[in-house]
Image: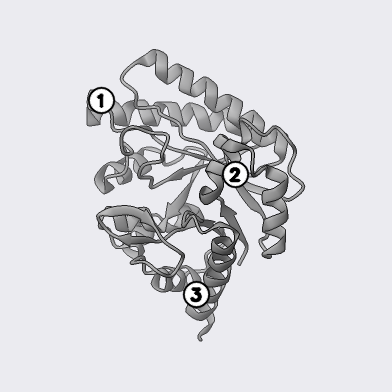
């Protein structure tokens, strides 16, 4: 199973200049990853070309903002991010619906998100970049939770995106945060899932990340389902334990062990 990692724990270090893409690439190679993941929080400030393969870049598109001018600005930023993905050789760009702004109704939010994500897919295709839509929750750069975080809205938007050139990224921890059975969620969307965010949290009513395998997320059951059903994508560790390089190394080791045990027996 191919394995990459999104270095959430190091975001403050990237912002302060203590970490850069070159350093992250070297760490990923040392720990035996197949590729790295990045965020636009990184690529917008570090313009270097990675020396290690880049699989996915995460962006935070807010296509549900009540102000159309803001939505248009979000789309323009998205296009810049797509161009950046092409520049650094990334395969995918992770996109989101937007924030659950209090002024945005469910009906309007669904319409806006589906419309902008459809246009986003067309533009990304012209740059040979794939898009991944995630069952998202809340990044630190947002004020509100994700508009499509609640399962009923998420599944409705996924349905509206059928036939659109967008695949899915499934986050294991976000499913549990919204008190969903992640395996049952996967069963509904499995054919369209290309990447798995391997993430763990301490408890279902809190988005407090923990080391992989130390929280409530049933990773063994999730991996077992993926293995039994011939998952052809890859795993991406969302490493947010803030335990430094040691946390990344432990996360990589734990993920590989959990996958091996779930798919091939202990």
Residues 126 and 248: in front is 248
User: Which numbered disc flags the more N-terminal residue, 2 or 3?
Assistant: 2
| Left or right of 196, for residue 100 | left
Residue 181 in the image: state x and y as whole percent.
29, 63
Which of label 1 and label 2 is nearer to you?
2
Residue wearing tag 1: 104
Q: Residue drawn at (50%, 72%), measured in percent from left and top? A: 227
Residue wearing tag 2: 38
Q: Residue drawn at (71%, 62%), measured in percent from left and top? A: 30
- Give the structural element (helix, strand or loop) at label 2: strand
Residue wearing tag 3: 258
Residues 141 and 156: in front is 141
Residue 228 in the image: state x and y as whole percent.
47, 74
User: Which numbered disc flags the more N-terminal residue, 1 or 3?
Assistant: 1
Are the residues tagged 1 and 2 within 8 Å (C-beta)? no
The residues bearing labels 1 and 2 have C-alpha atoms spaced at a distance of 30 Å
Q: Residue extending furthest bottom?
A: 266
The residues bearing labels 1 and 3 have C-alpha atoms spaced at a distance of 41 Å
Using the image, determine if residue 46 lies above or below residue 246: above
């Amino acid at each position: 199973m191919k394995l990459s990692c999104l270095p959430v724990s190091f975001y403050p270090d990237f912002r302060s200049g203590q970490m850069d893409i070159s350093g992250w690439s070297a760490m990923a190679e040392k720990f035996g990853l197949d590729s790295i993941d990045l965020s636009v929080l990184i690529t917008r400030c570090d313009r270097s070309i990675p020396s290690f393969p880049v699989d996915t870049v995460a962006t935070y598109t807010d296509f549900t903002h009540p102000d159309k001018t803001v939505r248009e600005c979000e789309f323009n930023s998205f296009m810049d991010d797509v161009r950046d993905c092409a520049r650094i050789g990334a395969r995918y760009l992770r996109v989101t619906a937007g924030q659950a702004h209090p002024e945005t109704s469910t009906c309007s939010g669904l319409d806006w998100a589906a419309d902008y994500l459809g246009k986003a897919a067309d533009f990304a295709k012209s740059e040979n970049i794939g898009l991944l839509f995630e069952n998202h929750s809340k990044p630190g750069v947002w004020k509100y939770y994700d508009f499509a975080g609640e399962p009923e809205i998420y599944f409705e938007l996924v349905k509206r995106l059928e036939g659109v050139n967008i695949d899915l990224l499934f986050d294991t921890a976000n499913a549990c945060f919204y008190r969903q059975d992640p395996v049952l969620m996967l069963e509904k969307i499995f054919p369209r899932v290309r990447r798995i965010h391997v993430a763990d949290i301490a408890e279902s009513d809190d988005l407090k990340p923990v080391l992989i395998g130390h929280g409530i997320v049933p990773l063994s059951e999730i991996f077992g389902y993926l293995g039994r059903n011939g998952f052809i994508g890859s795993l991406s560790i969302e490493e947010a334990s803030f335990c430094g390089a040691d946390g990344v190394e432990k996360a990589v080791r734990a993920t590989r062990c959990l996958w091996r045990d779930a798919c091939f027996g202990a």
